[in-house]
Amino acid sequence: MKNVLMLTNGFPPHAGVEASRAAHLAKYLPDYGWQPHVVCSHWTQTNCPKYDPHFGGDRVKSYVVATVPPPADLSQVRSLSDIAAKAERFLSGHKNPSVWTDAILRRVNEHLQTHTIDAVWATYPFRATLYAADRINRAHEIPWIADFRDIFEQWTPRSQWWFERRNERAVVRSASKIVTVSLGLVRILEQRYTQSVECLPNGFDPEEMETVEAKSDPGAFSIVHTGSITPPGSVFRASPSDLFVAVDNLAARGLITLDEVMLMFYGATEDQMRPHLNGCACSRIIKTVPWLPRHEIFSLQKGAGLLLLLGARMPGIITAKLFEYLSSGRPIMVIPPDHNGVDDLLKKTRSGAALSTTDEIEAFLLKHYQAWKSGAPLNVEINAEEVNRYSRKKQAGVLAGWLNEISR
């Protein structure tokens, strides 16, 4: 069994998206001859807004060999002013926050005194993991993979892009392989680094979905969205306002009864939703729930009449929730089409439709509502073979192959 050091900020019991990617790959890597040694932040119910003690299970959590306090906790200890924190961001580059990175490197060096590590996997977003992997490579000549779940353009003001690009190149140039989650991001990173970039998409854990039962209100046709809602005009995802207009139009024509419809937004707050309402009549059937544990979210996804995905406006973004939706087996509607990978994925998996106009949304909603009303809800004839490509168990095998390649 070879050993891989996995550097990530998020890991169970943190249940965010970053933690999910790291946890599920770690879960299945031993099946392919790689033992994970995870170094991450130490998450508790006090410091973690997405704390889920059940996520990951004992086996996955046992792979953690060292933790450090999360960056926010360390910043509070240092009492950095806002101005000083911003200055450090530019001066320290990808080492920022340097107090977190220094703590990680101390723990890694301690671990290396008693363990042999054959390769390192470091995941972004959280730039300091890339810096730490670069330092480990320079000090110990251990090959490493730079894993980009996102790119800095998604999170950083354009005025800072030059600094981010300079800092990122300074550390990623030592990576043996660069990996990202979509073909759109592959193209961006290949232009940046003038080298081949691999694609390992977001995915789902088949065991996680198999263990939950569908949960729904039999008296209501539910449209379910899981995840946060961004402000109107955001590049990350579109507004749900077109859906609200379509629901209002159908109700105004007497084609649907609002009291029989539920618009459920799990992972969103009322404050996030308010700018998108624009006085819509259906606001009274909209429910927001800020956060739920993963197993409850999956139960609601499996019981949904329709699953809603709000399309991204920035090239290369294929949100992780799409793959959870695929594993639920429920029909998906994407508003609007992104013409950038999601639409093609829906067609290949036969899992739903991407809708451009209010008329298209109305027609799709009405078809599914009427089928539900008749007692014969429409299902989707999922292409199971295509969906299985995004199983974390299968993807761990792909990652193991790359680790074998760089560690020869």
Image (cartoon, rainbow, N blue to C red):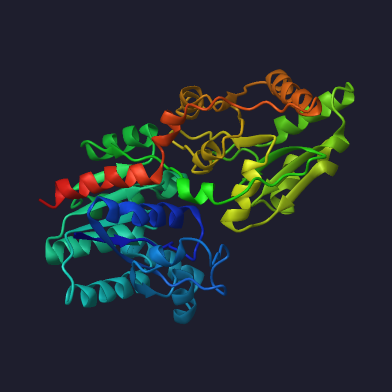
* Residue 238 seen in the figure: no
Q: Does residue 299 sit above or below 137 in this rendering?
A: above
Q: Dividing the image into 4 quarters, which one contains the N terminus?
A: bottom left
For the residue pair 143 and 207, the one nearer the viewer reads as 207
Q: Position of residue 65 (x, y in %)?
A: 31, 72
**Residue 325 in the figure: left or right of residue 278:** left
**Residue 402 in the figure: left or right of residue 68:** left
**Residue 300 in the figure: left or right of residue 31:** right
Q: For the point 62% across and 51% down, which residue is it?
A: 297
Q: Position of residue 272 (x, y in %)?
A: 69, 50
For the residue pair 375 and 351, the one nearer the viewer reads as 375
* Residue 306 seen in the figure: yes
Write down the quadrant of residue 284 in the picture: top right
The mark tally for this picture is 0
Q: Residue furthest left?
A: 408
Write down the quadrant of residue 198 in the picture: top left
For the residue pair 319 and 85, the one nearer the viewer reads as 319
Q: Position of residue 265 (x, y in %)?
A: 69, 46
Q: Position of residue 76 (x, y in %)?
A: 49, 77
Q: For the point 75% across and 40% down, which residue is it?
A: 263
Q: For the point 44% across and 70% down, which residue is it?
A: 71
Q: Does residue 131 sit above or below 243 in this rendering?
A: below
Write down the quadrant of residue 292 in the picture: bottom right
